[in-house]
Image (cartoon, helix red, strand yellow):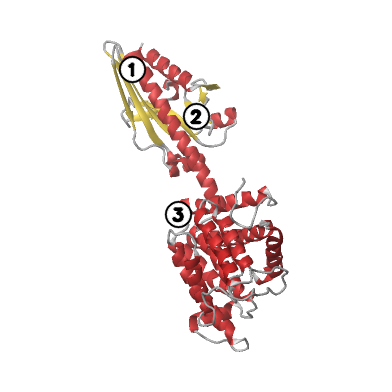
Amino acid sequence: MTLDLTGSPYSLEHTGQGVFDDVAGLLQRVEFLRSEGALTEETLRDYFGEKRFLQIAESNALEGSTLGVGETQLAVLKGMTITGHDPAYSRDAVALARALDRIAEFARMPEPTDLEQLREVHELILGDRPGAGMFRSEPVRIAGSSHSPPATWSQVMVGMEAWETWSRTNRHVPAVLRGVVLHTWLTHVHPYIDGNGRAARAVLNLELIRAGLPSVIIRRTDRARYLDALAESDSGGDLGPITELVVERAKDALRDLERAAKRQQGYSEAAARLETRQRNQLAIWNDAMKLLFSLLEAAAERTFGSVGTVSTRWYDDQLQFDDFVALSRGDAAGNSWLFRIGIEVPAVGAAKYLAWTGFRSDQMLSQATLSPGPSIFWSVPDVSRRRSWVRRDELSPGGAELTLELPDVDRWIVRTREGAVTRLTASAVVRRIVEDIERALS
């Protein structure tokens, strides 16, 4: 994977393939959660309710705030000024909470991140302090950094207009990398007298939330690593270190989101992935059954249609997921009808068969070295009239039991009426079925 970051001060040439793989993996995990229906309103409320105050406390702590998570929650929800701490930290907590609320609103809008959105976010972060939402017109120095940001208002504007242009013209860049570029570039230009870091991290999370990813939390314990990574990007334009940090925190956030889903719905990523594999195998099985039926219907019509009557019935309800799982456990509760075929030749006779799905026999499991799963069995009309159909292996056309070793559909596994197991193509299975029906009529 390569990305062209032309128009930005950055490159990814020193970033390992592992970072790209991690970014792709994050998107796949979120899409998987969404496809499994795990991202319900309850799950999201649980997750963001838990993380909201942690995110505020940690982002402000990177700028020197001493408020903990509980104290931040009191400041935001109760409007309290926390004793023992600088009163400004309580105001900062309330202000950042408002900014994050606005970020959530922006995330629902189709427009890419731009200077107007940034201005609103910064105004909320600084509140009634001087310079809120206004680019600086004087030089600044970044404590602990050798980087010298643009010194004049016009130089700041040049940098931020390029920032906006890149944002508007690079919507295709994956959200994690978009967020890293916009965040890091903003800290590089450092357009405000105060609040640059908090605004940059808000923009990073805006990109993630807009793409359906959970917001990340750069922790106070990450401060040294975070500053070092920004210094690397300032000096050589290498996004590798900051991207790696963001990806790690995105993994943390996604894991916590999955835990929230598990709490709310019993969601388990491992179980959900296994269920997806089961559903994929079921889809393959059902398609293979439909193909077998179509081949058999055509072959029967060719063989018997000119001299008799061929009647078939495909049962609309194909094997359902719960039944598939039950048969894979050896539970007959999953048995279901598959299709019916009847042949009637005047002055010769008639034959009727019901193909149904049941769990694999012990003979099939032992001789074909298969794991438990579904097989096709045959029933014929019950001459005793105790029931409509009765299983009679010795009368079953084509074999007493037919199955597939999923996901392989090229070879059918057939247990013959004599008990032997053989592997055949679908056309060979159909030929055997028709030949056995012909013998039954003679």
* Disc 1 from disc 2: Cα separation: 24 Å
The residue located at (59%, 52%) in the rendering is 6
Mark closer to the chain start, 1 or 3: 3
Q: How many marks?
A: 3
* Disc 1 from disc 3: Cα separation: 45 Å
Residue type indicated by callout 1? Glu
Q: Which of pointers 1 and 3 indicates the residue nearer the eye?
A: 3
- Residue receiving disc 1: 301
* Disc 2 from disc 3: Cα separation: 32 Å
Judged from the image, the secondary structure of the residue bearing numbered disc 2 is strand
- Residue receiving disc 2: 403
Q: Position of residue 264 (x, y in %)?
A: 48, 62
The residue located at (48%, 27%) in the rendering is 402
Mark closer to the chain start, 2 or 3: 3
Q: Position of residue 238 (x, y in %)?
A: 68, 56
- Residue receiving disc 3: 37
